[in-house]
Amino acid sequence: MEYEICLEPSGICFMANENQNIVEAAKAHDVAIKHGCASGSCGDCKGTILSGESEQGPFMPLLLTPAERAAGMGILCKLYPRSPMRLRAEVISGNIWNSHIVSLNKLAWNVLELTLKPENAYPYRTGQYARMAVPEHQDQWRSYSMATPPQDHGELVFHIREIPGGLFSQWLFKKAQCGDSITLGPPQGDFALHPEQNRPMLCIAAGTGLAPIEAIIQESILQGQNRPVHLFYGAKKQADFYHLDQLQQWAQQYPQITVTPTISDMEDTHWTGARRLLPSVAARGHWQNHEVYLCGSPGMIEAAIDLLLSHGVSHAHIHFDAFAPNG
Ligand SMILES: Cc1cc2nc3c(=O)[nH]c(=O)nc-3n(C[C@H](O)[C@H](O)[C@H](O)COP(=O)(O)OP(=O)(O)OC[C@H]3O[C@@H](n4cnc5c(N)ncnc54)[C@H](O)[C@@H]3O)c2cc1C
Ligand code: FES
C-alpha cells in the first residue's frame, strides 16, 4: 500500500510505501528530512505526528523524553505509515560547504585525524557533527563529529576510525591527499555541554567516541569551569588508544580532571590500568549528582544508560551521541 505523507510547515507532500520509513520515502522523492544515523540511534529525525496512523519501529532508549512522547513525537527513520499522514518535520536546506583537506595525521593504527578547511564559515556548536559526502560517491553521506570547539581559524578536526570495507574511511585511509575536496552538509546534532555549572561531569567515551567528548571537555575548560570531570575512555587493546598523552596532560594541568583509560582485552598482561569500561565506571563512583556525557557504539550507550539509571542517575542528566553505522 502507498500513502500520501504531507510535511509541515514546508507543505511538501510525497507518497510512501508501507515498508518504507518516512525518512527513506522522503529521500526517494528528493526531500531531505533532517537525519543523522538513519538507524534509530541519534534522534536527529524527530518529528511530530499531526494526523494519521503509523507503526513506530524500535529506537535507542531515551531518544524521546516522556513529554515528547506525550506530544505525539516519533523517530521518523523508524516510522512506517499505515494511512495518509500529516507530520511536522524539519526539512534541511540544500546548503552545502566545499572544504579541502589541510592535514591527515595517524592517531592510532586504525584512527586518522582529519583536518578540513571549509571555503566559507561553518558555524557549529561544540559536540555537533557534520555529514560528509563520500568522494567518488556523492550520493552517499557519512556522519563525523567535530573533535574541538569552533576554532578562530575556521578549521574542522575529526577523528575517523577505519572501517573494513567502509566506503568513506577506506577512501580516506587509502587514497586521500592534502588538498582533496570534501563536501559537507550543515552541522547537526544536540549533543552539547549543558550549563549546570554546579554538577560534576561523568564522561564515558569508547574508541573515536572520544572526539565530541574531548570537544565538550575543552569547551568546559575554555568557559573557565572548574567542576570535577571524570573521563572514562575505553578501547579494546592498548594499541587502540590515541591522545592518552594529551588527556594525561589535561589531568595534570587541571586538577578537576580525572582520566581513567580502560581496555577490554583481558589477555593483555602488560596493561596495569583498569579493565572493562562500564564495570570500571560502576566500581569507581556514586554518579547520582553528575551530568553524564556518553559517546561510542549504540550497544555501549544502551548498556551505559541501563547502568546509570540503575545507579539513580535521572534521564534528564544523561546526554549521548551514538556512533551508529550509516543507515
Ligand atoms: C552522529 C554520528 C557521529 C559519528 N561520528 C563519528 C566520528 O567522529 N568518528 C568515527 O570514526 N565515526 C563516527 N560515526 C560513525 C560513522 O559515521 C560510521 O561508522 C560510518 O558508517 C563509517 O562510514 P564508512 O563509509 O567508513 O563505512 P560504511 O560504508 O558506512 O560501512 C561499511 C560496513 O561496516 C559497517 N559499519 C560501519 N560503521 C560501523 C561502526 N561504527 N561499527 C560497526 N560496524 C560499522 C556497516 O554496517 C557496513 O556493513 C558517527 C556516526 C553518527 C551517527
Ligand atoms: S536519523 Fe533517525 S534516529 Fe538517527
Image (cartoon, rainbow, N blue to C red):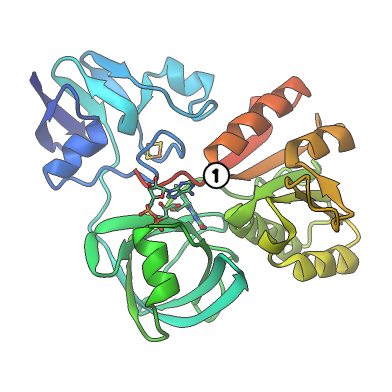
> Taking 45 as reference, is 109 left or right?
right
Q: What residue do we see at 71% from left, 67% from top? A: 243
Q: Is mark 1 within 8 Å of ligand 1?
A: yes
Q: Quadrant location of ligand 2?
A: top left
Residue at the disc numbered 1: 321
Q: Position of residue 290 (x, y in %)?
A: 78, 37
Q: Position of residue 305 (x, y in %)?
A: 65, 29
In-front residue for pair 120/135: 135
Q: Position of residue 18 (x, y in %)?
A: 16, 21
> Taking 31 as reference, is 126 left or right?
right
Q: Where, quadrant-wise, is the C terminus in this rendering? A: top left
Q: What residue do we see at 78% from left, 48% from top? A: 267
In-front residue for pair 149/2: 2
Q: Is residue 36 visible?
A: yes
* Element at label 1: strand
> Taking 155 as reference, is 247 left or right?
right
Q: What residue do we see at 78% from left, 24% from top? A: 311
Count neighbours of disc 1 (C-alpha within 10 A) and say few if under 14, some if 14 to 19, many if 20 or more: many
